[in-house]
């Protein structure tokens, strides 16, 4: 049995410090989930557990990409985001190196329903390599759209690739591929 007082795990404030494979300063002890300094989200903890099991029991060499974790507020309307905010991007890359694309509109799907909802979509792009580093949305279906956008951002999608993608009309998400 492990005596927690004698264990003396290295702490960073209120979190247990771990390396890139979630190993603590005690080589036979690993930590995942809310006790480590990573986003405290259920899907993150589940993936940490999967990666640990694959690596420890399956002899694989998997890691977790924490860069593009989608987040949402399930309000009405929804708010969702993935990647860097405009402010974060400006702090990292400098304001002159960031380009912002925005679109504000009323979804066509609500025109015939006589619903007066609006959407706001935003892309944050690194000018030096045209890479989309942030995707944000306020409005109907935000969480679903941002979940799919997170795949593209994780793969290193560029604004040019967004622009060359065929739009599905009339959808809200088509605005991401028609922003100029």
Image (spheres, helix red, strand yellow):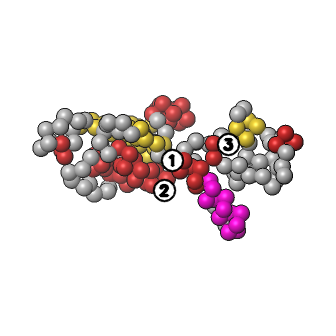
Whether 164 is among the magenta residues is no
Question: Please, is residue 177 above or below residue 137 in the view?
Answer: below
Q: Which residue is mark 1?
A: 68
Q: Residue at x 12, y 44 (%)?
A: 112
Where in the figure is residue 9, as x and y percent of width and height? 80, 42
Tell me whether the residue at label 2 lies in contact with that at label 3, contact meaning CB atoms closer than 8 angstroms: no
- Per the rendered image, the range of residues in magenta is 48-59
Indicate which disc, 1 or 2, sits on the residue closer to the N terminus: 1
Q: Nearer the viewer, mark 1 or mark 2?
A: 1
Residue that carries the numbered disc 2 in the rendered image: 155
Q: Residue at x 20, y 51 (%)?
A: 170
Instruction: Please tell me whether mark 2 or mark 3 is closer to you in this view.
Output: 3
Horizontal side, residue 91 vs residue 138: left or right: right
Per the image, the residue denoted by label 3 is 36
- Residue 40 place in picture, x, y as percent: 58, 42
* Secondary structure under the numbered disc 2 in the rendered image: loop
Callout 1 touching callout 2 (CB < 8 Å): no
Tell me the chief SS of the magenta region.
helix
What's the distance in space between the residues labelled 1 and 2, CA to CA?
10 Å
């Amino acid at each position: 049995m492990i005596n927690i007082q004698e264990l003396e795990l290295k702490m960073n404030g209120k979190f247990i410090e771990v390396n890139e494979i979630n190993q603590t300063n005690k080589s036979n002890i690993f930590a995942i989930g809310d006790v480590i300094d990573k986003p405290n989200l259920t899907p993150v903890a589940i993936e940490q557990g999967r990666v640990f099991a694959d690596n420890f029991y399956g002899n694989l060499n998997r890691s977790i990409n924490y860069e593009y974790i989608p987040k949402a507020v399930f309000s009405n309307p929804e708010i969702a985001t993935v990647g860097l905010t405009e402010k974060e991007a400006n702090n990292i890359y400098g304001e002159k190196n960031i380009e912002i694309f925005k679109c504000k509109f009323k979804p066509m799907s609500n025109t015939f329903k006589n619903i007066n909802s609006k959407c706001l979509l935003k892309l944050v792009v690194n000018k030096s390599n045209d890479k989309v580093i942030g995707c944000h949305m306020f409005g109907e279906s935000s969480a679903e759209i941002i979940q799919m956008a997170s795949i593209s951002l994780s793969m290193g999608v560029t604004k040019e690739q967004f622009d060359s993608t065929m739009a599905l009309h009339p959808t809200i998400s088509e605005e991401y591929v028609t922003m100029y």
